[in-house]
Amino acid sequence: MASIEAARWLLKPAVAKPFARKMGMTAQVVERTYRLVAERVPVGFDPHDLPSLRTLEVAHGLKPHAIARADWIKPVDRRFAGQQTAFLMLTVTGVDEANTALKGLTIAGRKTLVRRDMDEPKRCSRCQAYGGHFARDCKAAHDVCANCAGSHPTSQCRVAGDSNMYRCANCDADGHAAWDRACPALRRRVRAHIHQKADSGFRFFVTNAPDTWVSDEDELERAPPPPTVWSQVRPSFDRADAEHQRSQQSRLDNFLRTPRQSATTTVRQ
């Protein structure tokens, strides 16, 4: 059962049902899911609208119901005024479907970058520490606010709406809250965790297909160079030069087609 072929065989309804019955009443054969992050998706997209998800699957050649779930990563009530895009978490069934989605998706008319979700350490909602425990098992003497690092529950924070007053309980730094995904303390733990994974550093979920053996470094080398001022204005200069050459050629052609008076004249006697 260690190969992809065996896994696909096991997922067949004719095989999965008797296999589950043999394993016990509570056993269930399910296909593995993969978490992806779609960046800068227009906020007008409704991730809970099932017809929209089915349309997205058809547009990109995904199997029906390949997108098992979609949710905004950041709570809607934490968006800033006028925010146009946000990050979307996609739960995709099947490694092939996940790798197809990683090539990019067009969501709500916008082509979005899709990447593998990074496994993030769990943070205790009571003491805010990344100590591998949850609030129900927390041994801290008092609550710590996730917004301002004060000694009170987050629900009682008086500066919840003022990001200028945020202070991270893990970094002891002002300017961001403990729940901020850009928190340096969180990023360090994520990087350390990723480096321990066998398939870390790959753009896709690695399978037997060679096109999934692309490292992040290779993907970066294949990417086009960032735009410069000259690369953006050069097309306008090229069009102007081409138009000038056509104009010059047209004037030359007209000059050559116009009959000219002979340079020699006959002198009357």
Image (cartoon, helix red, strand yellow):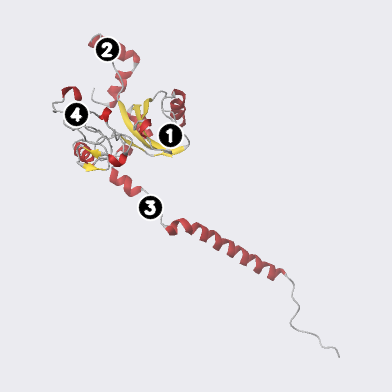
Q: Residue at x 61, y 63 (%)?
A: 246
Is 95 placed left or right of 124 in the picture? right
Q: CA–CA distance between discs 3 and 2?
A: 53 Å
Say whether marks 3 and 2 touch (CB < 8 Å).
no
> The residue under label 3 is which amino acid type?
Pro
> The residue under label 4 is which amino acid type?
Asp
Q: Position of residue 174 (x, y in %)?
A: 24, 43
Indicate the secondary structure of the residue bearing disc 4: loop
Is 266 placed left or right of 110 in the picture? right
Report the residue marked by disc 2: 20
Report the residue marked by disc 4: 143
Q: Check the image and name the residue furthest to the front.
A: 158
Q: CA–CA distance between discs 1 and 2?
A: 41 Å
Indicate the secondary structure of the residue bearing disc 2: helix
Label 2: few (<14), some or many (≥20) within 10 Å? some
Q: Judge by depth and name the residue closer to the eye, 49 or 185.
A: 185
Instruction: Kindly identify which numbered label has been placed on residue 226.
Output: 3
Quadrant in which the C terminus appears: bottom right
**Dot placed on the residue nearer the N-terminal end, 4 or 1:** 1
Please tell me whether mark 4 or mark 1 is closer to you in this view. 4
**Dot placed on the residue nearer the N-terminal end, 4 or 2:** 2
Instruction: Kindly identify which numbered label has been placed on residue 43.
Output: 1
Please tell me whether mark 3 or mark 2 is closer to you in this view. 3
